[in-house]
Amino acid sequence: METTSSTTASSSDFIREIVSDDLKAGRVQEVVTRFPPEPNGYLHIGHAKSIFINFEIAREYGGKTNLRFDDTNPLKEDSEYVNAIQEDVAWLGFKWDGLYFASDYFEEMYQRAIRLIKKGKAYVDDLSADQLRETRGTLTESGQNSPYRDRSVEENLALFERMRKGEFRDGERVLRAKIDMASPNLNMRDPVLYRISHAVHHNTGDKWCIYPMYAFAHPLEDAIEGVTHSLCTLEFKDQRPLYDWVIQECEMENVPHQYEFGRLNLSNTVMSKRYLKRLVDEKLVDGWDDPRMPTISGLRRRGFTPEAIRSFVSELGITIAGGEVDYKLLEHHVRLDLNVRAPRAMAVIKPIKVVITNYPEDLTEMMEMEINPEQPELGTKKVQFSREIYIDRDDFMEVPPPKYHRLYPGNEVRLKNAYFVTCTDFVKDDEGNVVEVHCTYDPETRSGSGFTARKVKGTIHWVDAKSAIQAEFRLYEPLLAGDFDEELPLEQTINPDSIKIEHGYIGADLKDAKPQEKYQFVRHGYFNVDPKDSTPEKKVFNLIVSLKSSFKIDNPAGK
Ligand code: ATP
Ligand code: MG
């Protein structure tokens, strides 16, 4: 099933090669992949890579992808996360074929464990967690057999049954695979398959008090669903022999195979759910969707688009090496996408008032502003102009430094989409701050009039004071203060400048701006209408990304 995208450069990665060989050789009739998050937190940008790989590969080869919740650890899981994960995957633009829960297979897994016991391939062990660790051996020393290793099949069956019935306390007994305590692969040294946990599960309630371990559950889940290619990150590589052992010894009909790729690591970003959850629980951020969070919901609220995230992870490709990727590459993709789609508008973030003293007091004019030069077919919109306007504080200086071409006494600049104005004087308050700037304008210079008699070096943006609407601007910097140090108290890992709030103005052309709409504020950057805090009366804008990039495309994807 060749598709156009499978013949592009990306088709050369090792996973696509395996998949296409399996299809050609007839080992696989239909490709089935899965994205298997544990519902113990929200998805982050790292998960987007895994989602993309699983869904895209299946799509390219005409196969299927399941969304499966790997919910085998009742203590950490919650249906809030189950819902959020579905929302995020769908928002990223992927449609799953089957929606499954590992917990729906608990009975089947239990039966497969009994089969192992009957074959003499699993036993109930009474050793404590500490004793299990102590007898496991090291990379250079083999482990020791448990004194309970040679229990009879009957005794094991009876004990496992009693474990299920809830006759033992947490940690009192486990079910272990009987493999080889001398294996050079530590995962093969009689790994634990089941543990006791008297906990309420988000899906099965208190039906179970024994739960399968990941290493036992995951291969069974894949086999039950008919997954053909089980794609996961590199830290599971050493588990592959155990994965295959479980499939074989449990006599699963479908035989999935596991393949590993490199995790996405982003500069200046911690993606561990454990860390992100602590930030949320200790209220150091405004929830999982705080716009500074590297979560999918945080990026969405910040204003990143699914298209930009997809083109970013697509550029990363599938590599085994998991080098660190520059965060600026992600921002670069966001700019590329928003440049084309975001309408332009003028906003003043740190305002100062300008009075155009020779402009008639009762006059207002509607100026033409191009909606988006990247989409000329959208045409122009009208922007109100009158005698008093706001400009950004940084666009006026009482004493200009060299090469400063914006407003200062005696200098003439262009007001974007309007007139040339010349600064005549300014007003200071008692503390010496400039609070008002006075200018005169030249009616001949109206934008669009074809005026060419003289040129100016600076163009600045503005908002008409009479019709301006107050707005809050949230300006973001990286959440992390420098290199991440897990030893530091949590508060100290956070950059105190990661959010700055400014109060300024937008023009009346944005009075109907809706949550999640994105704009390019000329000379400032791309902004998103905050979906949580913005109201029709007081709009709140999140800085998505600034306009200019210091990004040099050298080896951005860390390949
Ligand atoms: P975390 O360590 O952040 O809690 P996890 O690996 O425990 O992440 P899971 O819910 O188990 O999270 O992950 C679901 C899938 O996403 C797994 O197949 C996992 O390998 C993959 N995944 C998680 N983090 C990344 C990442 N940074 N890059 C690529 N894939 C990832
Ligand atoms: Mg995990």
Image (tube, grey):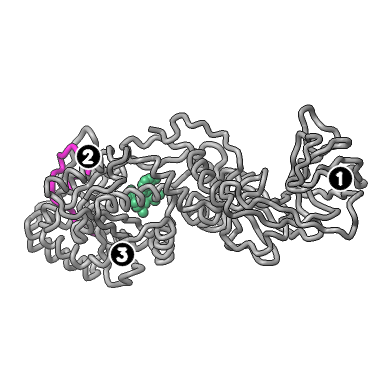
Is residue 22 at least partly visible in the picture?
A: yes
Q: Locate residue 373, reporting x and y percent.
A: 60, 47
Residue segment shown in magenta: 173-190
Q: Locate residue 310, reporting x and y percent.
A: 42, 49
Callout 3 secondary element: strand
- Tag on residue 99? 3
Q: Could you tell whether 228 is left or right of 356 in the image? A: left
Q: Name the residue under label 1.
A: 441
The crowding category of the residue bearing disc 3, from other C-alpha atoms within 10 Å (few below 14, some 14 to 19, many at least 20), is few
Of 487 and 317, nearer the camera is: 317
The crowding category of the residue bearing disc 2, from other C-alpha atoms within 10 Å (few below 14, some 14 to 19, many at least 20), is some
- Tag on residue 137? 2
Q: Earlier in the sequence, mark 2 or mark 3?
A: 3
Does the CB distance between marks 1 and 3 fall below 8 Å?
no
**Residue type of the residue flagged with mark 1:** Tyr
Q: Which of marks 2 and 1 is nearer the N terminus?
A: 2
Q: Could you tell whether 78 is left or right of 359 in the image? A: left
